[in-house]
Image (cartoon, helix red, strand yellow):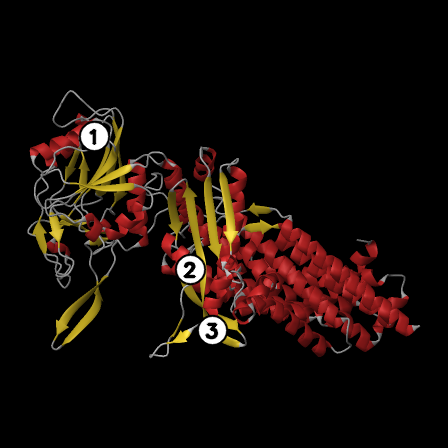
Amino acid sequence: MTAKTIAIARREFRALFDSPVAYIVIVAFLLVTGWMFFSTLFLRERADLRVLFTPSLFSPAMLLLIFAPAISMRAVAEERKSGTIELLTSMPVRDWEVVLGKFLADFALTAAAVLSTLVYAITVACIGDLDWGPVISGYLGMLLFAASLLAIGLMCSSWTDNQIVAFIVALLIGACLYVISWLQFFVPDFIAPLVDYVSLSSHLSNMARGVLDTRDLLYYFTLIGGALFIAERSMAHQHA
Amino acid sequence: MSNRKGIDTVVGVLAVIGILILVNVLGAKLFWRGDMTRGGEFTLSQGTVQTLEGLTDPVTVRAYFSEGLPGPLAAISRHVKDMLDEYYASASGNFRYEFIDPTSEETEEDKQKKKESKRTITGQIVREKTSVERELERIGIRSFGIRVNEADSIERKMVYMGVEVRAGDKVEVIPVVRSAEEFEYELTTLVRKVSRKDIPKIGFVVGHGGPEPEKDLSLLWQKLERIYELTTIDLGKKPEIDADVRAILVVGPKTALSEDEQKAIDRFVKGGGSAAFLVGPVAPDPQSLQSSPAEHGLEAMLASYGLKLGEGLLLDVEYVPIPVTRQSGRMRVTQTVDYPFFLLPKGLDRGHPITRGLEKVVFPFMVPVEMEMQTVSGVEARAIVHTTDKAMIQKPPFDLNPFQHWTRDSFTEAGEKDLIVALTGEIPSHFDKEAHAARARVLVAGGYSFVTDAFSGRQIGNQIFALNMVDWLVMDEALLAMRARSIDKAPLDELSDTSRNLAKYLNILGLPLAFVAFGLVRWRMREARRKRVRI
């Protein structure tokens, strides 16, 4: 990672917090997540955070599915729409430095929202004997899950100058990858294991249980790497 | 030129995607799994490792899992496969396994049979069973139905998720693996059963109007049967306990055991055998909740062990309400009523192997067990279940009517009382005052309804308690540790409603408000800075 990447990431991150976007995203995420978690905590009576990480139709992971494209939709599309992309590409920075810098800024914002929920873990640890191992793997899973969605969002943002189009396409791709494992009932038997592997949520649920598996890590890293690579190629192709 | 660049970009992107897919394919073959849970929920327990290291003859496991299982079932299938890999790696040669899709074993004839389905008069589609289905049914592995998409329509498909464990001519099966968390316990239990030269024998002392184990304690009997060899012992017919019996259970006799019968038990304990006495002064009827007196006649023998059973039934503030059906006019109405005789004590000894990790165990109709250990030496007595200090006692004659008025005046204050006591060490002989057991275990409970099917034997907590009790009696610490691990889910501390609400709303609202405040402060500072700037 170069100094230029970090400079871009810092500028983008500050810009996010100078606008109400960051606060709206974080506050909305925390309100809904807090309610999802604490509305059942005392019913379950278990000192664990598995509910926070386990993907379902009504879970914080589902929220990220919507928030991540909303954060990343502007990354390249906005620059292209306002014409500042020309300015940016005329500077002595490489395309991958721009893509990585923007990705890191978006990731830092999402990580701030996700890691804010560590307060829940501390609360649970105060009122029960919390096992921190699955909490750590759960957070790692959530961060990788969010990073994957952001990379997909950034990739979609690099394809168009319309933020709404970028948002919708990224949301669709993310949603397909999220729910695909639940659609195994509807696919022929021989592709069911493939469908399970491709799914974003099945890898997250493994980490939510407290299992660190190189297959899950590899899946997320290759998905992030692949999406960012396509974003970089897309940018390079368009200003070539 | 632009076209050429476009083609180059697409080719580059496809090449990288191909490489990433290849990396994932290789990664799926060569992987590493780490277990982050404190209790190593997803790592082989010490008990399993010891069992595998101790294998002297080959054990073969065949896991019959259908291909293409959906969602959560696929996760269980994956977990079973991963765990079998771990078993294989730990067993140094004497453990082999096959992971089989039953359809892959079908012959051409079987495939033909599957195509030839017939419709019955009721419209049900039936077909002849394949050889694989018949064979799996014969060994006890059952298929079950799930909904799948076949040829663009949702159909019910029969799938397998069973495991066969074989050593020589001994075969045991898990008909359906229902939970990833309990798989290790179930598999290791069966590996032990098929590989052991001597399976511990457990005897249920029957007769005297007490519950019949295979009928009234059927749930416990079925679970124990998977681990131990079980037998019933009628001391009235033959006042002797066979030497190969490792532990006996005396459960709820209604009439007194004769002196000869007691002597047989005494000789058994003196010889190092373990015994559980689940006895009380009342034999409740599960239908009518009427009581009849029970005279087990074991008071003197228990007194020799330093224990005395109280006479009154315990009531406590920690209890479970029960459903009661009664006739109301022409209608039969079922309602849930408070019933403090069904104790649900939180006072479970977390340090003892029997109660470690347990939470909800219901103890109906119990009398206190009092320890008078001053006269007994060399014995360690430990109360593993006790009431709160608000417990009360109903003295005979007992009124078990669930619709009675539970006023404090009707009962006697009892304070904290022990319900179950575990004894280890040199248990003294009742009939031979000079003798004592070299190393024995005795458990005494002031009641027996907690193991019967009719009362609380169906509760998971009660079943685990009863299994733990038997494991402890036969000193199978490995199994105990494994089972405790599978249920060790940390509970939350007791909190008042105010504290709960405070924790809840501070987190739900406090955290977002803190971010809003941060944003406002930052905005005000920026505004102030902007005003200071003069051009």
Local crowd size for mark 2, using a 10 Å CA cut-off: few (<14), some (14–19), many (≥20): some
Q: Position of residue B204 (x, y in %)?
A: 20, 42
Placement of B426 over or under B40, stated as above or below: above
> In the image, are marks 3 and 1 on the same chain?
yes
Residue type at the position of mark 3:
Glu
On what subunit does the disc labeled 1 rest?
Answer: B
Amino acid on which disc 1 is placed: Val
Sequence order check, earlier mark of 2 and 1: 2
Query: Alpha carbon of mark 3 to alpha carbon of mark 1: how far?
Result: 59 Å
Q: Give the alpha-carbon distance from disc 2 to disc 1, as whole Å.
A: 48 Å
Tag 2: residue type? Glu
Q: Give the foreground label among 2 and 3.
A: 2
Q: Chain of mark 2?
A: B
Residue topped by disc 3: B155
Question: Looking at the picture, how far across and down is residue B262, in whole percent?
Answer: 12, 33
Which residue, given by chain and number where applicable, does mark 1 sit on? B269
Graded by Cα atoms within 10 Å as few (under 14), some (14 to 19) or many (20 or more), the crowding at tag 3 reads some
Marked residue nearer the N-terminal end (3 or 1)? 3
Task: Please say whether residue B535 is visible from this viewpoint.
Answer: no
Does residue A93 appear anywhere in the picture?
A: yes
Left or right, B524 with respect to B40, comes to right
Disc 1 packing (10 Å; few <14; some 14–19; many ≥20): many
Tag 2's secondary structure? helix
Look at the numbered disc 3 and give the secondary structure of its residue: strand
Q: Nearer the viewer, residue B380 or B465?
A: B465
Between B312 and B151, the residue placed more toward the observer is B151
Residue drawn at point x = 16 percent, y = 58 percent: B286
Residue identifier under label 2: B133
- Residue B235, image quadrant: top left
Residue B507, position as x, y percentages in the image: 50, 61
